[in-house]
Image (cartoon, rainbow, N blue to C red):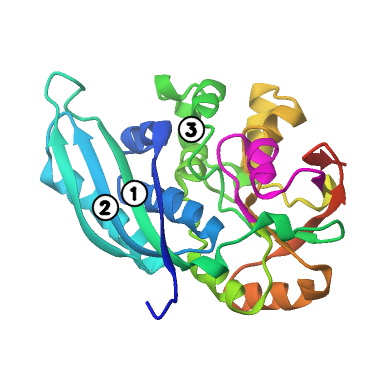
Amino acid sequence: TNMPHPVLISGTDGVGTKLRIAHFMDKHDTVGIDCVAMCVNDIICCGAKPLFFLDYIACGKNVPEKIAEIVGGVAEGCVQAGSALIGGETAEHPGMMPEDEYDLAGFAVGVVDKKKILDKNTMAAGDVVIALPSTGIHSNGFSLCRKVFDIDNNNPQLYVPREELGGKTIAEALLTPTKIYVKPVLALLEKVNVKGISHITGGGFYENIPRSIPDGLGAKIDKSAVKVLPIFDLIAKFGNIPERDMFNTFNMGVGMSIVVPADQVELALSILKDNGEDAYVIGTIVESEEKVILA
């Protein structure tokens, strides 16, 4: 590794009930990307580079063509993450689940030099919060989505193209795979003093951003700066969901937040944009006992 003190960082996760959408659409080539993303996006929050990934598929019946689609997505996710796919497991569970259903999970292991593990205690008031845009809902909040859009009854409205979604159907928007942020974040870590990274998953802003902020400080987020994706507007409208609950459940268009010193903001944005990320500023770090202030 050419590291004086290599430390292994690991993460594990699944795709959750997003798989119901894949089941109804009979489209299984992207959920593997979600599975990889949910693991590798977590471990880069420590500053670690993913090394390898393994998947686990449990199914009612092993249909080789379907399994190949799923694993193809896993492989694509590993390519995007610069991670090796070194193996996995497929298990048939007849009688435990319907023949046409499956569950998908996995884990990743990465490495970081001990002195480069991100230390949130270096954070200070005046530091700036940068947003990396999400591609959509990613892989959390689908229990609520299923209720809002009546997904479990395979609502026909799921398959109607909608103008506000750019001609996509709700089902297509929901199935959009989770973005993998590994390569742009690793490029950023090489040149910028990154003080904290949060992967915005279940719990939204209110539960994820605080993980990277020390006691006595909070993130003051400018709500008007957040580029909310149309799918979230639809969820709020269909489900009559209050704004705070939306920000406490979904990523709202921000897949990852990164805290950097104020004097390195322009450099950080430049590096991220050079690596394909349309990053932008959404807030600042302030002295506060409240970890997230949406104003």
Depth-wise, is mark 3 or mark 2 nearer the camera? 2
Amino acid bearing label 3:
Leu
Q: How far apart are marks 1 and 3 (CA)?
A: 31 Å
The residue indicated by pointer 3 is 158
What residue lies at 48% left-to-right and 41% top-to-bottom?
A: 139
Q: Is residue 2 above or below residue 281?
A: below
The residue indicated by pointer 1 is 107
Q: How far apart are marks 2 and 1 (CA)?
A: 6 Å
Mark 1 and mark 3 lie on one chain; the one further toward the N terminus is 1
Q: How far apart are marks 3 and 2 (CA)?
A: 32 Å
Look at the image and say whether residue 208 sits in the magenta stretch.
yes
Mark 3 and mark 2 lie on one chain; the one further toward the N terminus is 2
Q: Is residue 69 above or below residue 7?
A: above
**Horizontal relation, residue 271 to residue 63: left or right:** right
Residue at disc 2, secondary structure: strand
- Magenta stretch, residue numbers: 197-219
Indicate which disc residue 54 carries. 2
Mark 2 and mark 1 lie on one chain; the one further toward the N terminus is 2
